[in-house]
């Protein structure tokens, strides 16, 4: 084993063993930037993202977590391109006056789990909002903003994401 492989293995072992002792900032940084997908998957789980077997998330997966234990539940064999954002909680962090507006409080602020079913392909720079369910075998085109559920066996793209066609 060469020196780079040894160093990589050492870092993997340390990150794997120390996950429960790391501050949340470090957990988020590792989940977002660390190149080893096995480690990112474990650190994302600590942030409330459950991933099924064969699911792969590229670098830059960002999560705005829910107040609940599980923010995002992802099925098996899902492909997540770089820089995807899951927003499970849409509340403004520091808004006081804005929270007094009924429409915003009742319609725009949500804290709901996002569900991604099996065999989904999510393109680069996609944003998925709270409470969305992405149906199995669907595709979301790069740069899309998903504000409504995605039907199974379909292709969506755009801002907001709209159905382009069925893929079955």
Image (tube, rainbow, N blue to C red):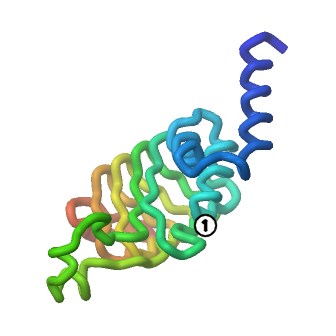
Question: Residue 75, image x and y in percent?
Answer: 61, 66
For the C terminus, the image quarter is: bottom left
Farthest residue in the front direction?
96
Image-quadrant location for residue 150: bottom left
- Please tell me whether mark 1 sits on a helix, a strand or a loop: loop
Q: Is residue 146 visible?
A: yes
For the N terminus, the image quarter is: top right
Front residue of this view, candidates 114 and 15: 15
Question: Residue 144, image x and y in percent?
Answer: 28, 57
Farthest residue in the right direction?
1
Question: Residue 39, image x and y in percent?
Answer: 67, 43
- In the figure, is residue 64 to the left or right of 18? left
Q: Which residue is mark 1?
A: 75
Badge 1: few (under 14), some or many (20 or more) residues near its Cα, within 10 Å?
A: some
The residue shown at (15%, 83%) is 101
- In the figure, is residue 152 to the left or right of 94? right
Q: Is residue 49 above or below residue 42?
A: below
Image-quadrant location for residue 63: bottom left
Q: Is residue 4 above or below residue 134?
A: above
Image-quadrant location for residue 118: bottom right
Q: Is residue 126 above or below residue 162?
A: above
Front residue of this view, candidates 26 and 88: 26
Q: Is residue 60 above or below residue 144?
A: above
The residue shown at (56%, 58%) is 78
- In the figure, is residue 69 to the left or right of 7? left
The residue shown at (57%, 42%) is 26
Front residue of this view, candidates 50 and 136: 50
- In the figure, is residue 138 to the left or right of 96? right
Q: Is residue 164 visible?
A: no
The residue shown at (32%, 71%) is 91
Question: Residue 141, image x and y in percent?
Answer: 33, 55
């Amino acid at each position: 084993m060469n020196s780079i492989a040894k160093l990589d293995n050492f870092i993997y072992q340390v990150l794997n063993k120390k996950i429960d002792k790391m501050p949340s900032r470090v957990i988020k940084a590792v989940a977002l930037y660390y190149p080893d997908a096995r480690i990112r998957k474990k650190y994302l789980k600590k942030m409330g993202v459950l991933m099924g077997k064969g699911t792969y998330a590229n670098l830059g997966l960002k999560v705005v977590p829910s107040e609940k234990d599980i923010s995002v539940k992802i099925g098996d064999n899902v492909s997540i391109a770089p820089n995807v954002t899951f927003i499970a909680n849409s509340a403004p962090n520091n808004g006081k006056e804005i929270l007094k507006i009924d429409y915003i409080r009742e319609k725009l602020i949500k804290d709901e789990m996002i569900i991604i079913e099996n065999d989904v392909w999510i393109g680069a720079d996609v944003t998925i909002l709270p409470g969305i369910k992405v149906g199995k075998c669907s595709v979301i085109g790069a740069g899309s903003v998903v504000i409504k559920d995605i039907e199974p066996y379909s292709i969506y793209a755009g801002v907001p994401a709209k159905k382009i066609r069925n893929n079955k």
